[in-house]
Amino acid sequence: MKSTVRENENYRKLEKASKMLKAMAHPLRLAIVNLLEDGSKLNVTQIFESLNIEQAVASHHLSILKDRDVLASERDGKNIYYSLKHHQIREIIKCIHTCID
């Protein structure tokens, strides 16, 4: 019996990629990814202060990016530091900058 496209492993990978891209497809989330594009690790305070937004707003968007496998987090005492989970995301950001210039 032939498997359908949706059962195909490649389709599942495409679904995951789509969810990651959708997560980044918001101006604030894209700004967060852009902050981390250079490989830095930032905590929530550094992120919301850099973007001049409320802490709760930053936390909400960080949660979405982390849930969609875009960001990694690392606890250091009371702080949680966020970074890009995949270095290839930098290439996506570079491409976006090239397209909008």
Image: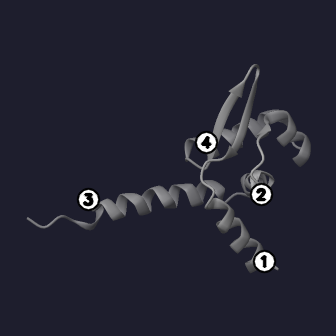
| x 76%, y 20%: residue | 78
Name the residue tied to disc 3.
7
CA gap, disc 3 and disc 4: 26 Å
The Cα atoms of the two marked residues, 1 and 3, are separated by: 36 Å
Instruction: Kindly state the secondary structure of the residue where label 2 is placed.
Output: helix
Tag 2: amino acid? Asn
- Which mark, residue 66? 4
Residue occupying image coordinates x 65% and y 67%: 92
Three-letter amino acid code at the position of disc 1: Ile
Q: Quadrant of the C terminus?
A: bottom right
If you read the primary sequence from the N terminus, does the residue marked by circle 1 or circle 4 appear first?
4
Residue 43 is left or right of residue 8, and the answer is right
The kind of residue on which mark 4 rests is Lys
Tag 1's secondary structure?
helix
Question: Which of the two residues, 58 or 80, is positioned nearer the viewer here?
Answer: 80
Could you tell me how far apart the alpha carbons at marks 1 and 2 are, in whole angstroms? 14 Å
**Label located before the other in sequence (1 or 2):** 2
Q: Position of residue 99 (x, y in %)?
A: 73, 79
Vertically, is 95 above or below 46?
below
**Residue occupying image coordinates x 76% and y 42%:** 41
| Mark 3 and mark 2: Cα distance apart in space | 34 Å
Quarter holding residue 94: bottom right
